[in-house]
Image (cartoon, helix red, strand yellow):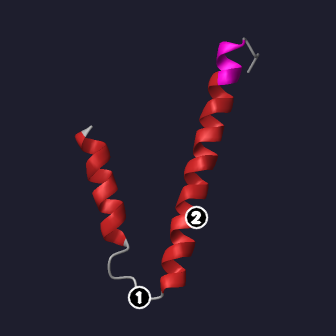
Amino acid sequence: MGTLVHFKNLYLEAFDDCKPEILVILLKAYSAFCALMLLMALYAFFYRAFTGFEF
């Protein structure tokens, strides 16, 4: 659990001194989009692995 808190702190500190606010918003939206795509890929992989899909 400490690792997740550490990553959260790193993520929040990365945007502390970023001046163009629109850039901060775009970067946070992009990181959320990337996380969503990664979760969807992992879900698809495990769904196919557990339902017997032939790779």
Q: Residues within 10 Å of mark 2 (few under 14, many from 20)?
A: few
Quarter of the rendering occupied by the N terminus: top left
Is 11 above or below relative to 18?
above
| Residue placed under numbered mark 1 in the picture | 19
Kindly identify the residue that appears in the image at 28 percent across and 58 percent down: 9
Image position of 52 (left or right of 38) = right
Q: Is residue 16 left or right of residue 37?
A: left
Residue drawn 33% across the image and 82% down it: 17
Query: In this rendering, is residue 41 above or below 46?
Result: below
Q: Secondary structure at mark 1?
A: loop
Which residues make up the magenta segment?
Answer: 47-51
Left or right, residue 1 beside residue 22? left
Q: Is residue 48 magenta-colored? A: yes
- For mark 2, give the secondary structure: helix
Quarter of image, res 45: top right
Residue 10, placed above or below residue 21: above
- Spatial CA distance of label 1 from label 2 is 18 Å
Q: What is the quadrant of residue 8 in the picture?
A: bottom left
In-front residue for pair 23/52: 23
Residue 50, position as x, y percentages in the image? 65, 14
Residue beneath disc 2: 30
Q: How many marks?
A: 2
| 2 and 44: which is toward the camera | 2
User: Residue at point 55% right, 57% down?
Assistant: 32
Which amino acid type is shown beneath numbered disc 1? Lys
x and y percentages locating residue 29 in the rendered image: 57, 65
**Magenta stretch prevailing secondary structure:** helix
Q: Please, what is the three-letter code of the amino acid marked with disc 2?
A: Tyr
Q: Earlier in the sequence, mark 1 or mark 2?
A: 1
Q: What x and y, as percent, mark residue 5?
A: 28, 48
Give the residue furthest to the bottom: 19
Q: Is residue 4 magenta?
A: no
